[in-house]
Image (tube, rainbow, N blue to C red):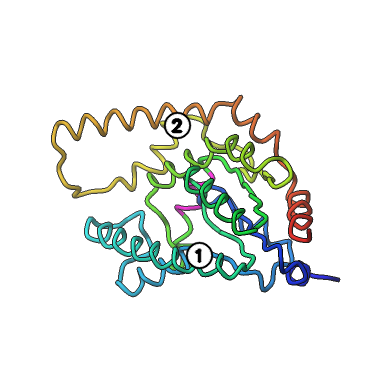
Amino acid sequence: MISLVQLLREAQGNPKAVILAGAPGAGKGYILRGLDLGGLKTMNVDDIYVPLLKKANVSLDLKNATPEERSEQAKQMAAANKQFKGEMEQIIAGKESFILDGTAASFKKTAELKSELEEAGYGVFMLYVYTDLERSLKQNQDRFEKSGGEDRSLAPAIVMRTWASVTKNYKPYRDLFGGGNFALVANTLEGDKLENLEDIVDKYLTPFKPTNTKPKTPAQQQKAKERKAKEEEEIKSLLDDGFVKDITSDGLSKEEAQMKLKQFLSK
């Protein structure tokens, strides 16, 4: 059987980039697991960020971080992003095929990257894995403990905002990549799940609400209140049954998405 890596090596003049999109805990790795991708480089900023956190003696249980740990986290993330950017530039300059394993939460940055890659001669494909908000939060909450402290759990408020950004970008991404180079897989919770945003917040965010935060001025408090209200309205619209049915109805099975991705890589 000819592997995808062999096919990629044969197509030396046409490097490929696969951009993964999906909230934390969506299961992007699960979708890729059925493909023979051995040897194909996977780029993930966490491969730099997590060792930096460990070196700085910061717990990977970021959902329970102290103010000092949150400050150190931000410092290490800035350093990781700087190093990651340099590595990406080298990969693209060398015309190496790769998988970008991230959330693609920023439509603007992802669209800019797609344009840069295409100008460099790359074929670009997006694998978008949709999951519901509760699954994203649940997977994140359990990740640190299940990994024995080797994988990080993010602050749940960050997970929720990332989920909202990725989810609202689904249609723009579908339009940007077109049908040929885009595949959606829905990977959601089975059985009963919370439907009400307030209940989700009470279960997954409230227990980990940051403490000892820096006091805000009245103006800052008002701005934060307005931002929170706007975010909640947006998330409620993304939890609407009509929206969920619309996005999941576009989905492929895991096997169909794998086949589509394999066809792209073997062109």
Q: Hey, which quadrant is residue 96 in on the image? A: bottom right
The 10 Å Cα crowd at callout 1, few under 14, some 14 to 19, many 20 or more, is some
Q: Which residue is mark 2?
A: 197
Decide which of tag 1 and tag 2 comes sooner along the chain.
1
In the image, residue 196 sits, relative to residue 143, either above or below, namely above
Q: Quadrant of the C terminus?
A: bottom right
Which is more toward the observer, 227 or 96?
A: 96
Q: Look at the image and give the residue range highlighted in magenta.
A: 135-141
**Left or right of residue 152: residue 28:** right
At numbered mark 1, what does the secondary structure look like: helix, strand or loop?
helix
User: Residue 141 got which mark?
Assistant: none
Q: Which residue is mark 1?
A: 88
At numbered mark 2, what does the secondary structure look like: helix, strand or loop?
helix
The 10 Å Cα crowd at callout 2, few under 14, some 14 to 19, many 20 or more, is some
Residue depicted at x 73% and y 62%:
35
- The secondary structure that dominates the magenta segment is helix
Q: Position of residue 38 (x, y in %)?
A: 69, 72
Q: Nearer the viewer, mark 1 or mark 2?
A: 1
Which is more toward the observer, 157 or 8?
A: 8
Amino acid, disc 2? Leu
